[in-house]
Image (cartoon, grey):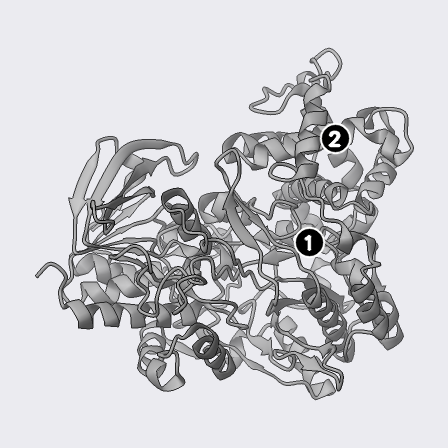
């Protein structure tokens, strides 16, 4: 039940491309510094160019209209036949990042900017939000399978946010069969604990 | 008394025989030992104080309320999610209660390599016995095995693989399944319902929502107390200041919290240089039928077969270096872990109740590091590399074999390549290093250790064998940071035992401090 000789050899030779990548992800790494610099010179995206937040009636807390639009478009791509509105997912991301602060906020805003504008890396000439949902998913898959850790890390971060906010939504219980947490369903008293004084 | 710091708007100045930073496995154990022997104990905890009625057992609430950085912390390259808690009770609020003693070979290693002569099974026995008694540690009852645990056990038995029921820290568990979101019934023996009430009723003062920031020192360099700020429980924004004067300062804020405090207050080059996480990879198996994978307790069964590394005649890695724990997860977290996008993701979540799962606890050879970024924010680096990557692959293969032997239709390796295995040939040909490259799949670390380790060599350790810092008299470390490396099993019980040993030494040498 040991690992194959092929894997041992590959590891020794270092021929697995992603294992030899030393680039990191976002702040604190060379690749991340570059990514942030790239995003910094990109247009922030005014509400006229990205009307999604306004049309959804959303007052954004930390995301820009462009970042909201990217998060919403990513939710449209990642979530197929899931009974949660992509706008609800994007709003959840905005609300969470407003509270979470750095480094998560800056990292995630950078990811959203990169996904929107680096479509050429995935062989597309239009921005991410301008692609059809199926094309968006194919484009995101190029990030997922990239030989560069930075791009895979960006994909995992974006995907993680989207699916987490979608599948914690109670509407999805009809798909998963999740009955809900016990405190929602049963009145079972906790064992008493004497903490002494609580001030 | 327990003080809710989130409500404090006026500065606080306090003093004690000992101030303890952190209230989890290490801090709670050490604090209770000393408080019940007459020491004046003050504890500060960066997280909030939660009771059973606060635990909704909804994952989104738990993540936001008491998971470190709201459950969003990761290594700088995002490849490993870092799972830790910030709350009164520390990581024991969300731990699974697995209470496994440190293997003798690991204690041997720590004695040999780090000079920790007291880490013998004989010397530790009274501390293990006392803590196991206090926490009600016992072998998990059969009634708390859910179907996932039974399937993992069946697969192991079919293959002749060694596994066993987990010793667990619970009393009268009702098996709701959501222990990692805080026990809503006070049945799991977390520190916040065991040692913390004892400290409080012995006259100790526990400040919640209190972030320690500055180590106070006398002109001759001795630790004399700490300063910090109370913080808003949700936003973590500081408000009123506090100062605690004490001749003994004990750091027990976990491998991240203790390292961050020391990085901000010392120039010690050992701090954060080694950071162990026991990388967790996850395998999911579709049994094509609804199984009860979320009742009982997540981990009633542990697979020990591959804990030690095996080498061939040439000394090359030939397998092992990890244990496996049965695993179950709530829908949101499972969706993240399961991988896939679009229809693939949705189909997997539709089958969520059909899935069994196990996770790895890899005994890594290559630790990462903790450091402060140029922006002053604490960061972590960790790369699963070299032989550790081979261990991860070996885990994925052997976990797949266990589930296939238990009757799974197919096993999902949740990588970005959509790897699925249905037979032994698939196991050998489809699972390889590309699946464990950073960010090729969700991976995590929750056994955070070793960032301010004990040892006799002052050039290679932060604290001596007593837990006292080599270079700062009066400053002690008594948490996961103090352990010199991976325990190779769940470390919580070993952290408690080490903290109790350090407390006993303090009490024996000094009696009641200040008296």
Q: Residue at x 48, y 36 (%)?
A: B376
Comparing B7 with B19, the one in front is B19
Q: In the rendered image of this protein, does residue A56 appear above or below residue A147?
A: above
Whether residue B113 is visible here, answered yes or no, is yes
Q: Quadrant of residue B507?
A: bottom left
Q: Residue at x 36, y 44 (%)?
A: B265
Q: Which residue is mark 1?
A: B442
Whether residue B61 is visible here, answered yes or no, is no
Q: In the rendered image of this protein, does residue A10 appear above or below residue B225?
A: below
> Helix, strand, or loop for circle 1?
loop
Count of marks placed on residues: 2
Q: Residue furthest left?
A: B515
Do the dots labelled 2 and 1 sit on one chain? no
Locate residue B194 relative to residue B165 in the image: left or right.
left
Q: Which residue is mark 2?
A: A114
Locate residue B117 relative to residue B365 in the image: left or right.
left
**Few, some or many C-alpha atoms within 10 Å of disc 2 (few <14, some 14-19, many ≥20)?**
many
Q: Position of residue B197 (x, y in %)?
A: 25, 59
Comparing A92 with B416, the one in front is B416
Q: Residue furthest top?
A: A48
């Amino acid at each position: 039940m040991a690992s194959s000789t092929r894997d041992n050899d590959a590891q020794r030779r270092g021929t697995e491309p992603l294992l030899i990548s030393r680039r990191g992800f976002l702040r604190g790494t060379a690749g991340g510094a570059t990514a942030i610099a790239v995003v910094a010179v990109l247009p922030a995206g005014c509400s006229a160019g990205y009307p999604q937040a306004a049309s959804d009636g959303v007052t954004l807390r930390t995301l820009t209209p462009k970042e909201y639009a990217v998060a919403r478009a990513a939710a449209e791509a990642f979530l197929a036949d899931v009974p949660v509105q992509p706008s609800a997912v994007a709003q959840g991301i905005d609300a969470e990042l407003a509270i979470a602060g750095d480094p998560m906020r800056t990292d995630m805003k950078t990811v959203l900017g990169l996904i929107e504008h680096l479509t050429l890396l995935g062989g597309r000439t239009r921005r991410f939000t301008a692609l059809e949902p199926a094309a968006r998913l194919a484009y995101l898959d190029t990030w997922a399978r990239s030989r560069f850790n930075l791009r895979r890390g960006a994909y995992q971060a974006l995907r993680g946010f989207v699916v987490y906010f979608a599948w914690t939504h109670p509407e999805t219980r009809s798909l998963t069969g999740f009955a809900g947490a016990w405190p929602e369903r049963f009145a079972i008293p906790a064992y008493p604990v004497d903490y002494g004084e609580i001030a | 008394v327990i003080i809710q710091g989130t409500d404090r708007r006026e500065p606080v100045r306090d003093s004690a025989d000992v101030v303890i930073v952190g209230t989890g496995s290490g801090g709670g154990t050490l604090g209770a030992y000393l408080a019940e022997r007459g020491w004046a104990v003050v504890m500060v905890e960066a997280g909030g104080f939660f009771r059973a009625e606060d635990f909704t057992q909804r994952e989104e609430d738990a993540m936001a309320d008491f998971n470190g950085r709201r459950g969003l912390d990761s290594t700088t390259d995002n490849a490993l999610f870092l799972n830790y808690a910030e709350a009164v009770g520390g990581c024991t609020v969300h731990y699974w209660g697995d209470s496994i003693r440190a293997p003798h070979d690991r204690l041997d290693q720590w004695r040999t390599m780090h000079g920790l002569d007291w880490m013998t099974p004989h010397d530790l026995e009274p501390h293990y016995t006392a803590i196991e008694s206090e926490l009600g540690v016992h072998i998990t009852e059969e009634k708390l095995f859910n179907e996932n645990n039974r399937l993992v056990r069946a697969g192991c038995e079919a293959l002749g693989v060694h596994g066993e029921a987990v010793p667990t820290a619970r009393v009268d568990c009702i098996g709701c399944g959501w222990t990692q979101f805080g026990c809503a019934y006070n049945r799991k023996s977390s520190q916040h319902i065991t040692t913390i009430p004892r400290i409080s009723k012995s006259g100790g003062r526990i400040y919640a929502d209190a972030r320690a920031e500055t180590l106070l020192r006398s002109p001759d360099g001795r630790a004399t107390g700490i300063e910090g700020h109370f913080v808003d429980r949700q936003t973590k924004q500081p408000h009123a200041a506090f100062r605690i004067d004490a001749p003994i300062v004990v750091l027990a804020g976990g491998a991240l919290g203790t390292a961050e405090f020391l990085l901000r207050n010392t120039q010690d080059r050992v701090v954060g240089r080694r950071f162990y996480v026991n990388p967790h990879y996850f395998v999911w198996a579709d049994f094509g039928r609804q199984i009860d994978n979320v009742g009982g307790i997540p981990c009633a069964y542990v697979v020990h077969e591959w804990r030690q590394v095996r080498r061939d005649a040439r000394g090359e890695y030939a397998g092992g270096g990890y244990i496996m724990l049965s695993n179950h997860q709530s829908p949101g977290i499972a969706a993240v872990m399961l991988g896939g996008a679009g229809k693939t993701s949705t189909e997997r979540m539709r089958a969520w109740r059909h899935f069994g799962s196990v996770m790895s606890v890899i005994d890594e050879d290559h630790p990462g590091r903790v450091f402060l970024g140029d922006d002053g924010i604490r960061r972590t680096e960790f790369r699963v590399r070299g032989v550790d990557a081979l261990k991860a692959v070996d885990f994925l293969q052997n976990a797949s074999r266990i589930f296939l032997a238990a009757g799974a239709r197919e096993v999902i390796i949740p990588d970005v390549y959509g790897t699925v295995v249905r037979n032994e040939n698939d196991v050998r040909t489809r699972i390889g290093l590309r699946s464990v490259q950073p960010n090729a799949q969700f991976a995590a670390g929750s056994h955070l250790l070793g960032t301010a380790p004990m040892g006799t060599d002052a050039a290679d350790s932060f604290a001596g064998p007593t837990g006292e810092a080599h270079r700062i008299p009066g400053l002690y470390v008594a948490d996961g940071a103090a352990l010199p490396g991976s325990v190779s099993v769940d470390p919580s019980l070993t952290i408690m035992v080490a903290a109790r040993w350090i407390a006993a030494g303090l009490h024996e040498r000094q009696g009641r401090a200040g008296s």
